[in-house]
Image (cartoon, rainbow, N blue to C red):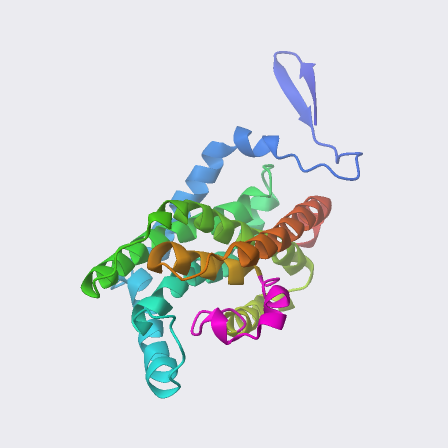
Amino acid sequence: MSTELTGALPVYRLRPSRRWVSLGLGELWDYRELLYFLVWREIKVRYKQTALGVAWAVIQPVFTMIVFSLIFGRLAHLPSDGAPYPVFTFAALLPWQLFSYALTESSNSVVTNQRVITKVYFPRLILPLASVCVGLADFLISFAVLMAMMAYFGIRPTEAAWTLPLWVLLTVLTALSVGLWLSALNVRYRDIKYAVPFLTNIWMYATPVAYSLSIIPPAWRRLYALNPMVGVVQAFRWALLGQSRSPGSAVAISAAAVLVLLMSGLVYFRRTEQTFADVV
């Protein structure tokens, strides 16, 4: 982008970068107020004219926890590593609901804002980033419910509870890394919109949300941890419920997978966003 003076007013000329990789992350700080506005707008729109309002943030994980407790806890008798099964499941549903919502919304963020994209310039990266941040509001509400459940069952958070912000950040980065790929692909291939719900459903059962990592054979656990949400779920349970073993290896493998997805997603998104206004 270059600036020329015409009379008293500057004229901005937008040109694509000549470099193969130009992430332009500095622009995000310049447009931070826009990011705040988009996040606040999405939060208000989400609960506007709803009968239950923010209660939806509690209803979904609570009812899912009840179903899992009945089917996998009572009927299938799956192990819960010594913790009450409802708390064991809800501690995993907390990051999973954040990831699932953020992934779904970020994958549709560019297409949903197509009218804005074709009229005004701003860093397109703000759109999936704002969609991911919106899910944090529901997360905080659900977290209060989990604290109430732990108090009811007489469970205190462990000394590792201070690491929770790190695992929340890892959850957000996981959703953003996949969301960058899907949001860019969704501009050209609208099948992505229909594939995302199917993907998240399959992904949930490939993540130890309703079951313990202990049922996975040790020989397969490193490969299994390439699923980034494996490390996230194990870290949440370890920090809150005091799992017997630290999830260090699982978190390290999952974090490495997220880093690869995030960097490749950023590059792909920035390389394809130049055509968004023409294709969307």
Q: Please identify the residue farthest to the bottom as the structure is shown.
A: 75
Classify the position of the C terminus by image quarter: bottom right
Where residue 128 sits: x, y (%)?
Answer: 54, 49
Q: Is residue 223 magenta?
A: yes
Q: Please identify the residue farthest to the front as the structure is shown.
A: 244
Where residue 50 sits: x, y (%)?
Answer: 29, 62
Residue 131 in the image: above or below residue 12? below
Q: Is residue 258 magenta?
A: no
217 left or right, relative to 97: right
Q: Please identify the residue farthest to the top as the structure is shown.
A: 8
What residue is at 26 percent from the left and 55 percent from the top?
Answer: 144
What residue is at 67 percent from the left and 58 percent from the top?
Answer: 185
Which of 116 and 103 lies nearest the eye of the viewer? 103
The answer to whether one can see residue 101 in this image is no
Residue 191 in the image: above or below residue 33? below
167 left or right, relative to 219: left
Classify the position of the N terminus by image quarter: top right
Q: Which residues are magenta?
A: 206-227
Where residue 45 sits: x, y (%)?
Answer: 37, 53
What residue is at 63 percent from the left and 52 percent from the top?
Answer: 256
Where residue 132 sits: x, y (%)?
Answer: 48, 51
Q: Determine the image quadrant of residue 225.
A: bottom right
What residue is at 47 percent from the left and 47 percent from the top?
Answer: 169
Which of 179 and 73 lies nearest the eye of the viewer? 73
119 left or right, relative to 100: right
